[in-house]
Image (spheres, rainbow, N blue to C red):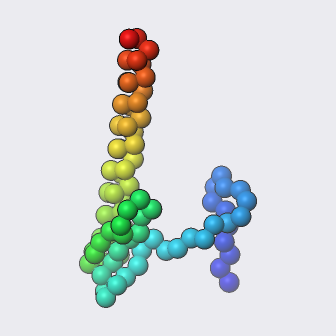
Amino acid sequence: MYQLHNRHGETGAIPARSARFYTVDGEWWFGIRRGPDQGPYPNRASARQALIEFLNDQFAFERQLQQDREHLASHNKNA
């Protein structure tokens, strides 16, 4: 039987989790938390690559947002 475990750094009750990848009529999709599911893709490997690219774009956006916030905070200090 499959046992659920906390992820690294998590404590307390284990939240419900679902599979990120799934198929509908032979086409592959992946789910994200912030928006609609992404797809369709011809196979799981393509969906996985698209997920990696999606996450890289999200991380880059968040890094840029943080840099912009730091720049604005610095600018407001000097004003």
**In percent of the image, x 52 and y 73: which residue is there?**
18
Q: What is the quadrant of residue 61 in the picture?
A: top left
Q: Quadrant of the N terminus?
A: bottom right
- The quarter holding residue 17 reads bottom right
Residue 22's place in the image compared with 11, above or below, is below
Towards the viewer: 28 or 76? 76
Residue at point 63% right, 66% down? 15
- Residue at 38 percent across and 55 percent down: it is 55
Q: Nearer the viewer, residue 65 or 54?
A: 65
Picture mark count: 0
Q: Is residue 12 left or right of residue 59?
A: right
For the point 31% across and 88% down, the residue is 25
Q: Please state the horizontal and vertical placement of residue 5, each as a whole percent of the image.
A: 67, 67
Give the image location of residue 10, x and y in percent. 66, 55
Query: In the image, residue 76 lies at what x, y percent?
Result: 40, 18
The answer to which image quadrant residue 28 occupies is: bottom left
Find the residue positioned furthest to the bottom. 25
Q: Residue furthest right?
A: 12
Q: Is residue 58 above or below residue 78?
A: below
* Above or below: residue 78 compared with residue 69: above
The quadrant the C terminus occupies is: top left
Q: Residue furthest top?
A: 78
| Above or below, 28 relative to 58 | below
